[in-house]
Image: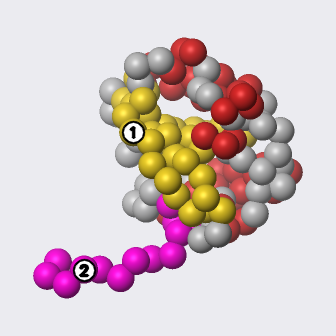
């Protein structure tokens, strides 16, 4: 059974006009800087989205994305909704065919393969980032 909410991750720079659609008002949890591919500074927006509204909100994100190079995703423990420009792909956790399909769709929008590591995103927020050495005492 799906959780009552999904976590959405959006890059501010991916949005036409640089802002989320109004329907996301009140859902934002935090914003923070991130180096995409260890080179490109971007701002990440994290939101909590009600499960029953997730498919519609994913479509709204898809409509708000710039036409190339970006996607946004929403996920819970069982599924991920990946919003590409004007397209949404659902990936059930562990479904390698759905992951391959989402990677192929991402390639259509010029998104580098290193940014399409969906299988890892349930466990690692930004698998494209360099692994940081663990602090001692952990």
In this picture, residue 132 sits left or right of residue 9: left
Predominant secondary structure, magenta span: loop
104 is higher (above) or lower (below) than 91: below
N-terminal-most mark, 1 or 2: 1
In this picture, residue 72 sits left or right of residue 113: left
The front one of 66 and 2 is: 66
The front one of 58 and 27 is: 27
Q: Residues within 10 Å of mark 1 (few under 14, many from 20)?
A: few
Q: Determine the residue positioned at 77% across, 56% down.
A: 111
Magenta segment, which residues?
A: 126-138
The disc at residue 135 is 2
Task: Please identify the quadrant where the N terminus is shown.
Answer: top left
The front one of 128 and 6 is: 128
The disc at residue 30 is 1
Residue 134 drawn in magenta: yes
Q: Determine the residue positioned at 72% across, 65% down.
A: 113
> How far is the residue under mark 1 from the one under mark 2?
24 Å
């Amino acid at each position: 059974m799906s959780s009552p909410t999904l976590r959405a991750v959006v890059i501010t720079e991916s949005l036409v006009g640089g802002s989320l659609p109004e329907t996301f008002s009140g859902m934002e949890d935090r914003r923070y800087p991130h180096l995409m591919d260890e080179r490109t500074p971007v701002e990440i927006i994290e939101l909590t989205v009600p499960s029953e509204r997730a498919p519609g909100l994913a479509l709204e994100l898809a409509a708000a994305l710039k036409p190339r190079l970006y996607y946004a995703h929403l996920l819970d423990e069982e599924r991920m909704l990946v919003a590409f420009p004007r397209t949404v792909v659902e990936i059930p956790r562990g479904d390698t065919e759905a992951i391959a399909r989402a990677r192929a769709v991402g390639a259509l929008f010029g998104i580098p393969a290193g940014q399409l590591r969906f299988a890892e995103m349930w466990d690692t927020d930004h698998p494209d980032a360099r692994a940081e050495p663990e602090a001692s005492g952990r």
